[in-house]
Image (cartoon, rainbow, N blue to C red):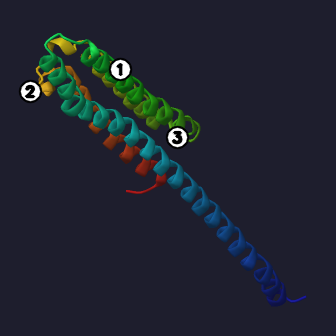
Amino acid sequence: MQPAVVAAIVSAIVGPLIFFLLKRWDDKKRRNFEIRYEEYKHYLKALEQIASSSHADFERFMSETYASCMNEILTSEGQSSDPLIRLNQEVNNLTADVRKPFTQATQELHGLRLVCSKKLLQKVNEYVNVQRELIDSSCSVLGNLDQMDINNPSVSLSGEMEEKGERTQVLFEEIVQQMRKELGIK
């Protein structure tokens, strides 16, 4: 055989083989990106749920339920213990309502722990721990309802709680940036 024929045969075999391998590699890379993207999107929703559910429930309780119960207590002037019983039930309900979505959302994060980098895992763990501390602090504030100003319940929030709230916002942005980095998005 002549060298030109051999070169043509080799080119006819090697060219499509290289193209096939490159396409397969690119498809695999794209599939992995899409899977990881969907997973990260799901986990970001879980992180947002951790932060938003407890905050909204707590604020609604303080502005509506607590004020209503205190008004009932003051208008009954000690004639009935029903408003106190209602307030106690509402506090218990709120505590359960705040902890339930937090627990569910943190359970959803278990899958993330399997696929993320060590750096991202550290940030997610810190975020969850700070949120847990915020929930615990919120529940302890509920334990001190007798010291609360019903006209301005946000005064009872400590500076430490506000700092933790700000820290969670920073951590959330750092988590998003780390996820983008791991996805190869600049």
Q: Earlier in the sequence, mark 3 or mark 2?
A: 3
Q: Earlier in the sequence, mark 2 or mark 1?
A: 1
Q: Write down the residue under mark 1.
A: 89
The amino acid type of the residue labelled 2 equals Asn
Q: Residues within 10 Å of mark 3 (few under 14, many from 20)?
A: some
Q: Residues within 10 Å of mark 2 (few under 14, many from 20)?
A: few
The amino acid type of the residue labelled 3 equals Cys
Quick check: 72 left or right of 121? left
Q: What is the x, y in percent for residue 140?
A: 29, 15
Q: Which residue is located at x 26 percent, y 27 percent?
A: 164
Q: Write down the residue under mark 3.
A: 116
Q: Please say if 122 is above or below 44.
A: above
Q: Are discs 2 and 1 less than 8 Å apart at CB?
A: no
From the image, which quarter does the C terminus lie in? bottom left
Q: Earlier in the sequence, mark 3 or mark 1?
A: 1
Q: Write down the residue under mark 2.
A: 151
Instruction: Tell which tag, 3 or 1, sits nearer the viewer.
Output: 1
Q: Which residue is located at x 68 percent, y 67 percent?
A: 24
Q: What is the x, y in percent for residue 166?
A: 23, 33
From the image, which quarter does the N terminus lie in? bottom right
- Residue lying at the far left of the rendered structure: 151
Q: Please say if 120 is above or below 148.
A: below
The amino acid type of the residue labelled 1 equals Gln
Q: CA distance from mark 3 to mark 2?
A: 45 Å
| Count of labels in the image | 3
Give the structural element (helix, strand or loop) at label 2.
Answer: loop
Instruction: Tell which tag, 2 or 1, sits nearer the viewer.
Output: 1
